[in-house]
Image (cartoon, rainbow, N blue to C red):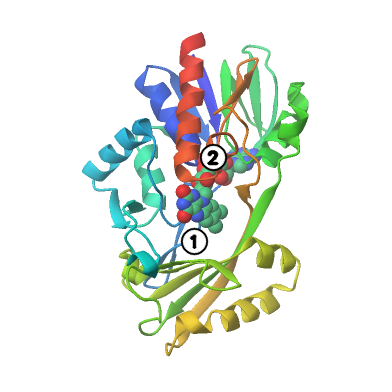
Amino acid sequence: MRVVVVGAGIAGLMAAQTLVENGHDVIVVDKGRSPGGRLATRRIDNATLDHGAQFFTVRDPLFKSHVEKWIASGVVTEWCRGFDSATQNNDGFPRYRGVRGMTDIAKHLANGLDVRCNTLAFSIAPGTTSKWQLNIDDGSALNADALIVTCPLPQTYALLVTADIELPDSMMRTEYDRTICLLAVLNQSSAVVSPGGLQNPDETFSFVADNAIKGISSAVALTLHANPQFSLEHWDAPPQDVHDLLLKQAKPWIGDATVVTSQVKKWRLATPLTIWPERHWANEMIVLAGDAFGGPKIEGAALSGLSAANYLQQII
Ligand SMILES: Cc1cc2nc3c(=O)[nH]c(=O)nc-3n(C[C@H](O)[C@H](O)[C@H](O)COP(=O)(O)OP(=O)(O)OC[C@H]3O[C@@H](n4cnc5c(N)ncnc54)[C@H](O)[C@@H]3O)c2cc1C
């Protein structure tokens, strides 16, 4: 069975790993330069910054069993047990992070899989020698007996236009929050205190992380996620204006430090606003998965990928 997975985020990689472990021939394609999707870590000079997902929590026993293996492999560690000073940063729930950054979790999962980065899937059409053909934007194509598509939903619809598969209306109407992210490397300690993360600290930001205190960066570097309201309001503003405004709003967290370098990154499809009631959706050997199915977090996306793989295993 040849399965092609579109998307090397956590959902696609969990699905691919499960299918490979069960003897299937799996190819994962991703348009990005490296696997991870919204698990994204960037290096700027000596600094390492997580600029997508910051941490994850674990509720489901199945996901827990995977996380325990990642911890044993030295890829994941506990960051803290909360960010709220009222509970002295300890509400009893572990927050996990990648030991060297969140992307490392994806790289670990991709190890041993046939993951083809810099590969933009362009369309899905009925195949001539197999059930489906995935067309790549360089003119090449991959044949597949089944496809698992894990892109955010608007990107998934674009791929499926040529597949003649009808999608539920409510799924097609799913909208996503946006996130504008400021990354700032500093010359000395920031004003963020241990454990190095602040949730909804003010009217602009939904999360502020000091990546040095977090434990992934040798240089002091802040990740500041603007909240959905700010991000929507300023999405189309000139990039330099948004950068300068965010830098100004970040002053309380920068403290007395000087900003050595800074840049803005935008996540257009950051968080799905409605979640499909099942962990995956399937029709004609095309399975849709990702955080719009399992829930808008790393755990939800991972469980959705596992659910998609298990579904295919049962029918093939
Ligand atoms: C700013 C931000 C902060 C977040 N913070 C947290 C957090 O702290 N904790 C938490 O649990 N969750 C957080 N999340 C959510 C979490 O990151 C996501 O729920 C999860 O990573 C989604 O995984 P996924 O595999 O479903 O999708 P993705 O990671 O988006 O993977 C989809 C992949 O598909 C690829 N792709 C898309 N179109 C194509 C195409 N045409 N061809 C080839 N490849 C394609 C993309 O490149 C991408 O790699 C955050 C998200 C953002 C954006």
Please indicate whether residue 3 sits to the left or right of residue 56 in the image.
right
Note whether 264 is above or below 306 in the view shown: below
Residue 96 in sight in this render? yes
Q: Amino acid at mark 1?
A: His
x and y percent of residue 44 in the render? 44, 70
**Residue at horizontal 31%, vertical 58%?**
79
**Residue at horizontal 70%, vertical 79%?**
241
Q: CA distance from mark 1 to mark 2?
A: 20 Å
**Few, some or many C-alpha atoms within 10 Å of disc 1 (few <14, some 14-19, many ≥20)?**
many
Q: In the drawing, what numbered circle is on residue 295? A: 2
**Image quadrant assignment for residue 170:** top right
Q: Is mark 1 within 8 Å of ligand 1?
A: yes
Note whether 239 is above or below 17 in the view shown: below
Mark 1 — residue? 51
Q: Is mark 2 within 8 Å of ligand 1?
A: yes
Circle 1 SS class:
loop
Identify which residue, 205 or 118, lies in the foreground: 205
Identify which residue, 225 or 123, lies in the foreground: 225
Identify which residue, 147 or 225, lies in the foreground: 225
x and y percent of residue 35 in the render? 47, 45
Note whether 26 is above or below 107 in the view shown: above
**Residue at horizontal 37%, vertical 18%?**
22
x and y percent of residue 310 in the render? 46, 20
Outermost residue on the bottom side: it is 256
Q: Amino acid at mark 2?
A: Gly
x and y percent of residue 81 in the render? 32, 57
